[in-house]
Image (cartoon, rainbow, N blue to C red):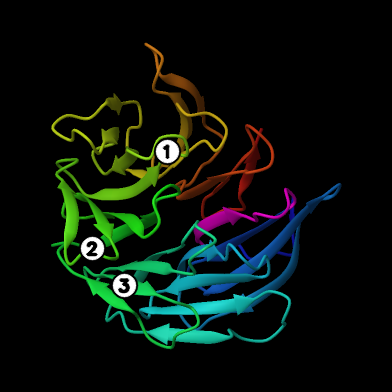
Amino acid sequence: MLTGAVTELVGSLVWAKSSDVWLYYAVLGCGTLAVLEQNETGIVLLRSFDWNDGLFDVTWSENNEHVLITSSGDGSLQIWDIAKPKGPLQVYKEHIQEAYSVDWSQTRGEQLVVSGSWDQTAKLWDPAVGKSLRTFKGHEGVIYSTIWSPHIPGCFASASGDQTLRIWDVKAPGVRLVIPAHQAEILSCDWCKYDENLLVTGAVDCSLKGWDLRNVRQPVFILLGHTYAVRRVKFSPFHATLLASCSYDFTVRFWDFSKPNPLLETVEHHTEFTCGLDLSLHKCGQVRDVTNLPFACLL
């Protein structure tokens, strides 16, 4: 049961890094960042923060468990401290179209944020600086996903409607690698937590593909089973070959690409588009997913 929470279309969901009971998600439509807790009565809304446009994505600070950043339909990023009840601490607005993706670097030695936009650019930010540090150009379509490498400082991936996956180094002048990964828009990508060269993409062609950066001529795996666009894909934080995906076909699917029959399970508990999911960093096998109805917990 979800008590006292908004039910507009959910854009993104992330687990808290410091606890297995706290999670946050951004809500489209009303532009609400909701803070929730799971207890014996169900999922309870603890507090919420409003923005004047839809929120598409949310990411955690690696150094402060109370601080996070959201990205918005007005092209801005908002920094929030959930311990403070009022509005955002800072707002950065440089993208000229929707800021669709945002991710905080996973290396504690650097405080960097990358955002991706429908304006076809990615931007690099230091939250302590009032403007972007750099703009990355090259995509020829909407950027749907920007994800930092958990292994290589200063390296991130971007997935786009131009059908490419691109790898960037913040210290290099241009794009490091361009991978024509699908013959359709790519909506999501993620890095393997156990292999610095392995990424997965999910696309409108209903497929997931794995890519080894040392040889991108062919994917190292192709996962088929979804019947509509793959909206989000995530590698497991506990197993090198396990991942989860959600789709506009209303399903969440679990895969092990090392097996001859990689599809482990299909969960069909939704009646609306499944548009976001995240895997717990604290409990193996615990997953949250979201639709435009209250989200679910998959164990």
- As rendered, which of 55 and 29 lies closer to the eye? 55
Image height check: is 168 above or below 78?
A: above
**In magenta stretch: residue 291:** no
- Part of the protein shown in magenta: 8-21
- Could you tell me how far apart the alpha carbons at marks 1 and 2 are, in whole angstroms? 24 Å
Disc on res. 123: 3
Disc on res. 75: none
* Circle nearer the viewer, 2 or 3: 3
- Residue 8 can be seen, yes or no: no
* Circle nearer the viewer, 1 or 2: 1
Q: Secondary structure at mark 1?
A: loop
Image height check: is 189 above or below 140?
A: above
For marks 2 and 3, the one nearer the N-term is: 3
Q: Quadrant of residue 280?
A: top right
The residue at the far right in this view is: 40
- The residue carrying pointer 1 sits among few (fewer than 14), some (14 to 19) or many (20 or more) residues within 10 Å by Cα, namely many
- Residue 116 can be seen, yes or no: yes
Residue displayed at 27% across by 35% down: 211
Q: Position of residue 46 (x, y in %)?
A: 76, 67
